[in-house]
Amino acid sequence: MHFVSSTNDLRKYLDLAAAKNINFSNISTDTRSISKDALFIAIKGPNFDGNKFIDQAFDNGAVAVLTSDTQYKNNTNPACIYVPSVKEALIQIATRICDEFKGKKILITGSNGKTTCTFLLSHSLPNCSSTIGNFNNEIGLPLSVMQAKRDSEYLVLEAGAGKPGDIAILSEIVKPHLGLITSISESHTEFLGDINGVRKEKLSMLKFIKDNGYFVIDDPSWWIEDYAHLKESLEKRGIIDINFTEIDHYLSEEDLDKKLKNQKHREQCGVNLDNREHPPKRIAAYVDYSDDHSIMEFEYYALDLNGEIHYSFNAYKSYLIGEHNIKNILLVAECLRIFEKNKEFSSKLEALLISDKVKLLNRLEHSSWIDGAHLINDSYNANPASVKAAVELLTSTLVTPSSAIKTNFRRRILILGNMLELKNPIESHVEIGKFINAGHIDVLITFGDLASIVAKTVKEGDVKGIECYSFESETEEDKLKIFLNDFIQKDDIVLLKGSRGMRMERFI
């Protein structure tokens, strides 16, 4: 049974008098995909008004509607529930549900990795309800909460930030027992200003974490300047923070152990320089990939302040590949350890990582492509940090410190679309071009006017002979498709990347 499955459930959370009760099996905001026996929520936005489609919703199978259209204000039809603001009503409903929820609540935000971490956590915890799809804004999160199961032991929710104040609103709704920030990087800076604006937006979660709750982050360096200001809040909460000082390929466990115990290396990591009350764990890992690069295997270690290794996981295997996913996996492992009384949750995570369920993430999806080439589809989204991670992944397919690691790929090819919603898009794309020049890819193919800046930067600064091909206009879509069909060859490895608005999957 979901928290909201009838009109009287809605009325209860909205402080409205009970009326004839109408049950519904699901909730929809789109009449184009509405199903039979649904509740239709009429969202009114700057460019659309769901109130205009209420009749169509009923024709398509809806049995009830939540609306702000004043013509329904005094309507006696029990199927029509009027509220002055649908958005505020959803926030009130979700807040009430979260306040009465008896289990543990986890809220996840971050520039990159939040959807991956949400998926891994929700599938590793028992009896868990979670974010539906990408419902992570002030409309979507309440919809996910409303459709959570009443008897859930855990509620794992994702919070996205498109503008200042979003994370605070969502955090106040949830009031999590554990808050996780997966990363801080240049994303949505068109609205959040700069990297500091992103950082402060994400950190607004902290004051809403329940007393004696937990705050998990990937790298404390970006919030250390706020430590004095946040200290009072931190003292009420358990702090677990992780600083990934090394994620690298090593020849053996012995070589890794030797490097970690090196005094100079520890000082470079800041191990002996950090005197905060809650010192971070220092993480190092060594990684290997299967021959077709579809499976990653790694071990990782954490150092205490004296440089001693105090725990490790052996032979972690994952269909999620790339060093950025090592970070995501370790963050999830930390969260699981907070709640588990034995190794059951961690065991579930280990099994999940090599299961077919992980493929539902649609992240770094592998497939055979044109003429037998190997394709890694990472077209879900893109910002500077995630593009750099993609370049590093593509680099790692052929360049590793271990001569024992063999690969058969002919060329490393990056197909890159525009990165959108950035405050300084030209600077950000130039930055990516410079980053690519420092790497080891063989071919860069760009699509879009901004992505062409990356190609131009590579051409101007390249000393490695990287081939560049640029398709600046979206009208060149067909031209690029023809080019790819002729250009891609057997044993190439190709990574496809771009912001969601670029729909780079159209080229597969």
Image: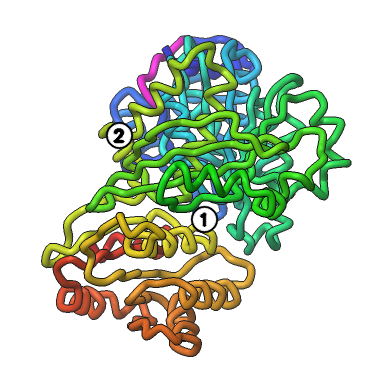
Q: Position of residue 246 (x, y in %)?
A: 56, 50
Q: Residue 494 in the image: x percent, y percent?
A: 28, 65
User: Which tag, 2 or 1, sits closer to the chain's start?
Assistant: 1
Magenta residue check for 24: yes
Looking at the rendered structure, the secondary structure element under dot 1 is loop
Identify which residue is drawn at 54% across, 19% down.
Answer: 10
Q: Residue at x 37, y 64 (%)?
A: 399
Q: CA distance from mark 2 to mark 1?
A: 43 Å
Where in the figure is residue 435, as x and y percent of width and height? Answer: 51, 72
Q: Depth-wise, is mark 2 or mark 1 nearer the camera?
A: 2
The residue lying at 65 percent from left, 60 percent from top is 191
For the question of whether residue 382 can be seen, the reply is yes
Image spot of residue 197 (x, y percent) = 72, 56
Which residue in the structure is indicated by mark 2? Answer: 354
Using the image, tell me which numbered label, if any, was put on residue 47: 1
Give the residue type at disc 2.
Ile
Q: Which quadrant would the N terminus be assigned to in this image?
A: top left
Left or right of 76: which side holds 481? left
Q: Is residue 98 left or right of residue 454?
A: right
Residue 236 is drawn in which quadrant? top right
